[in-house]
Image: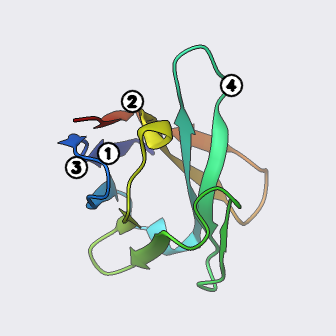
Amino acid sequence: QVQPVESGGALVQPGGSLTLSCLVDNRVFSTFHMAWYRQAPGKERELVANITVHDFAAYADSVKDRCTISRDNVANLVYLSLKNLKPEDTAVYYCQAKTSRGVEREFWGQGTQVTVST
């Protein structure tokens, strides 16, 4: 069973920062590519950042200079740190785990709400 569980969403003022966490309680966590997506109201889900099993990270242009994705293969966690938050960062943030071996499968969390507002 692979069930990502996100946490850390909050109401944040513009210019603020926060870190989201995603726990995948699975003994083969280190074999999953991990990613964060977000979906704003009325918009399609979009990729924010991803990190491979080899720790290679990539970012969307909209967050590239404000975002860090990292993983802890001992604690089975992946993090997304965002700084200088903007109202347009408001969205539900989803964690995705994708297999790196065998049949490609994706597993999604339920999401955590990030609201950037005064």
Q: Do the residues labelled 4 and 3 touch (CB within 8 Å)?
A: no
Identity, as a three-letter code, of the amino acid under mark 3 = Gly
Q: In this view, does 51 lie above or below 36?
A: below
Amino acid under disc 4:
Glu
Q: Which of 92 and 5 is in front in this view?
A: 92
**Residues at badges 1 and 3 in contact (C-beta under 8 Å)?**
yes
Mark 2 belongs to which amino acid? Gln
Graded by Cα atoms within 10 Å as few (under 14), some (14 to 19) or many (20 or more), the crowding at tag 3 reads: some
For label 4, the residue is 44
Q: Which residue lies furthest to the right in this view?
A: 103
Do callouts 2 and 1 mark residues in contact (Cβ within 8 Å)? yes
Residue hosting label 2:
110
Element carrying mark 4: loop
Callout 2 environment at 10 Å: few (<14), some (14 to 19), or many (20+)? Answer: some
N-term mark: 3 or 2: 3
Quadrant assignment, res 84:
bottom left
The residue depicted at 79 percent of the width and 51 percent of the height is 103
Q: What element carries label 1?
A: strand
